[in-house]
Amino acid sequence: MSDPTGLFEPRFCFFADLQVQVAAPQDVGQTTCGVRRLVPIIGGTAVGDGWRARVLPGGADVQRVVNDRLAELDARYVLELDGGDLIYVHNRAIRSGPAELIARLMRGEAVDPADLYFRCCPRFETASPALAWTSERMFFGHGARHPDKVVMRFFELL
């Protein structure tokens, strides 16, 4: 029997695994909107089904630490695929967890990723006709922050 609303349960499929290398955060400090941090992106890799890319240096993750349990992340960087095509990535995320673990993470210490909530919604833009479809789809993912990198897994929402 079909659903009379025409709606369906969402499905998804694997898109890519990323390892984004980061430099030491630049802490702006407490502002009127929360604690501001800028984390320089200095490289990394992305591996999808049948494709590979490198994360170009020069991007950044601009963070707003809302309180001692929650941070809003806004990362922007470029992927260069092995064939030379470029993809601009704009990835918004939320990272939350117990205050003591967030404090350790902010100090650059290792924290078990299973103890934190880190979810993201990447968007892609490209001039490549072969990759234009990525701008026409929605993606989501989850990640983990390590002292020198962020690892993420992205999925296409079908």
Image (cartoon, rainbow, N blue to C red):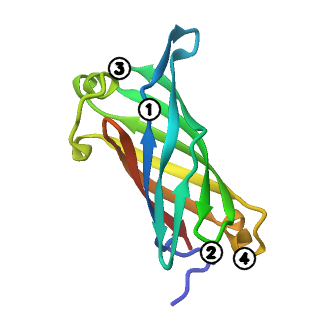
- The residue at which mark 4 appears reads as 130
Q: Is residue 25 above or below residue 151?
A: above
Look at the numbered disc 4 and give the secondary structure of its residue: helix
Look at the numbered disc 3 and give the secondary structure of its residue: loop
Q: Are marks 4 and 1 in contact (CB under 8 Å)?
A: no
Query: Which residue is found at the position 57% from the left and 53% from the top?
Result: 122
Q: Are marks 2 and 3 in contact (CB under 8 Å)?
A: no
Disc 4 versus disc 1: nearer the observer: 1
- The residue at which mark 1 appears reads as 23
Query: Which residue is found at the position 49% from the left and 46% from the top?
Result: 43
Query: Which of the two discs, 2 and 3, labels the residue nearer the N terminus?
Result: 2
Separation of marks 2 and 3 at Cα, in angstroms:
42 Å
Give the numbered dot on residue 5: 2
Instruction: Decide: few, some or many residues near mark 4? Use Cα within 10 Å; few <14, some 14-19, many ≥20.
Output: few
- Identify which amino acid the numbered label 3 is placed on: Asp
Query: Which of the two discs, 3 and 4, labels the residue nearer the N terminus?
Result: 3
Residue 68 visible from this viewpoint: yes
Instruction: Decide: few, some or many residues near mark 3? Use Cα within 10 Å; few <14, some 14-19, many ≥20.
Output: some
Q: Is residue 114 left or right of residue 106?
A: left
Residue 95 point in image, percent of width and height: 40, 37
- The residue at which mark 3 appears reads as 68
Separation of marks 4 and 1 at Cα, in angstroms:
32 Å
